[in-house]
Amino acid sequence: MKLLSRCSAFFVGDAQADRVVPPTGFTANLTIFSAAAMGFLAVFALALSLAAGRLADRWSNELARSSTLRISAPADQMDAQIAAALRVLETTPGVATAHALNDDEQRTLLEPFFGPDLPLDTLPIPQLIAINESVQGYDATGLRLRLAAEVPGAVLDDHTRWRKPLVRAASRLRLLGWTAFLLIGGAMAAMITLAAQSALAANTQVISVLRLVGAQDSYIAGAFVRRFTLRGFSGAAIGMVAGVVAIALLPAAQDEGGFLTGLGFHGAHWLWPLLIPMVGGIVAFAATRAAARRKLKELP
Amino acid sequence: MIELENVAYSYGGGELLSEISVKLAPGSFHFLTGPSGAGKTTFMKLCYGALLPTAGHVRLFNHDVRLMDRDDIALNRRRIGVVHQDCQFLDHLPVHENIALPLSVSGRDSLDELANLKELVSWVGLKSRAEALPPELSGGERQRAALARAVIMSPDVVLADEPTGNVDWEMSQRLLQLLIELNRMGKTILIATHDLNLIRAAKSQVQARVLRIANRRVQLAGADL
């Protein structure tokens, strides 16, 4: 409650305290523009992080629960091997369902590589069995040993081999997004610090007059801090709105589009960009406060 | 009130002031005189904590300035009205806001205080110039505005550094009358000036001590003034 009233007092401000520092139209516009640019980029960094997070979760969950059994056997033994494999799978704890792909399913699977109307009968293509795991999962090593004994031509692929690098890549991408977000925050802090330092340096006469009449450092710093915090906040808000509009105008997510078309926000994730102006304001507040304290300490 | 005890001040390797012991008692009226460059402004700055002594002690209202942080000095400065040599205003604010500045920084800008402001602006004869910006004022008007700002908080001490430096004799007399009036209200006054005629004019109306800075030291001036 106390914090809330302090925040509202900060935003409402002290009209007289605001007026003691002369207005600087051009510098103010530059600061707001830079904060807006940072806010805009921050929306994309956020979208990248969240999309990468979703991707990592999807790959991790979907691929972790499915696996494939490949059976390579002479044509006259194929049916017997499929039946034996299905029997083994039915009795394996942790396997929810298992079914042998029919010709149409196999053709659909291979269509992206060989095109439509693939003559499966004439090609020595192994038979695939799709396995769906139950929540507790199965013991892959045990299943492999059983299959080796009962279905010699069967090879179990639990997707671990390529699931891990994909999930790792998606996690790295998420990390990259957050790193970009932090760098944008750092760049904004640096930019606001430079602007605040230059404003303080340009107003040493004002500071000297304020000190002459008994102003404490908190009063002098406050006049600059409030101004730059509002600039950082409003600039980041403008950039955030522009970024959200740009994200909303991106093509809708489609399976064919893969990752790039899924860059937008989903559901409650649309609320995340609302944090950007607040982060902008906090960064501007901290940067200006530090710059003001440093400068006031330097001045006699 | 303000006490300097064996104070020295050095800058850039050279000693500007040395072995200075002065006490400004409550309600006293002092002049500080000496040639240009003698250190009058430095002395004044030591008196309101804008400079810290390199040796000795400066006490503002019984508190050693060396033991105060910047905020403490600022709080003590609210009890000292300063009329700076070059006045020092915020040029983008009108005169009445400049005069009210000490009230704003101390959070005392209530309606009652602002009513006093109007009275004060009239007292220094700037009623018609209250909305003007400081660069639009003449030298005398600036000095009067600076004096009004110095006294708006009803300080215990008024320090005026060359308050009549840029004004004609008539205006300097008017400013002097304002300062004498403040002294009669019980304020402690210290005026730094090299204008001996001003000092003579004051001595005929008020009991004033004259301090002279010579050879880095402050001495009590003799009857020649």
Image (cartoon, helix red, strand yellow):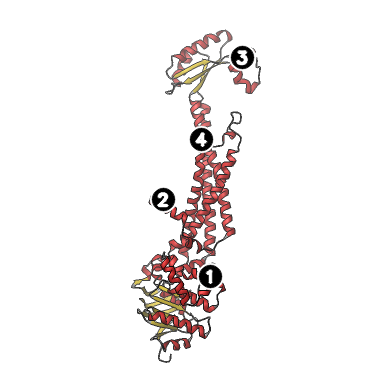
Q: Amino acid at mark 4?
A: Gly
Q: What is the residue that sits farthest to the top in this orientation? A: A76
**In the image, what residue occupies the spot 51% across and 57% down?**
A227
| Mark 1, residue position | B131
Q: Which mark is residue A124?
A: 3
- Quick one: SS at disc 2? helix
Q: Amino acid at mark 2?
A: Leu
Q: Which mark is residue A267?
A: 4
- Quick one: SS at disc 4? helix
Looking at the image, residue B27 lies above or below residue A61: below
**In the image, what residue occupies the spot 40% across and 82% down?**
B30
**In the image, what residue occupies the spot 57% across and 73% down?**
B136
Q: Residues within 10 Å of mark 3 (few under 14, many from 20)?
A: few
Q: Amino acid at mark 1?
A: Glu
Q: What is the residue that sits farthest to the left in this orientation? A: B62
| Mark nearer the viewer, 3 or 1 | 1
Mark 4 and mark 1 in contact (Cβ < 8 Å)? no
Q: What is the x, y in percent for residue A65?
A: 48, 24
Q: Are marks 4 and 2 on the same chain?
A: yes
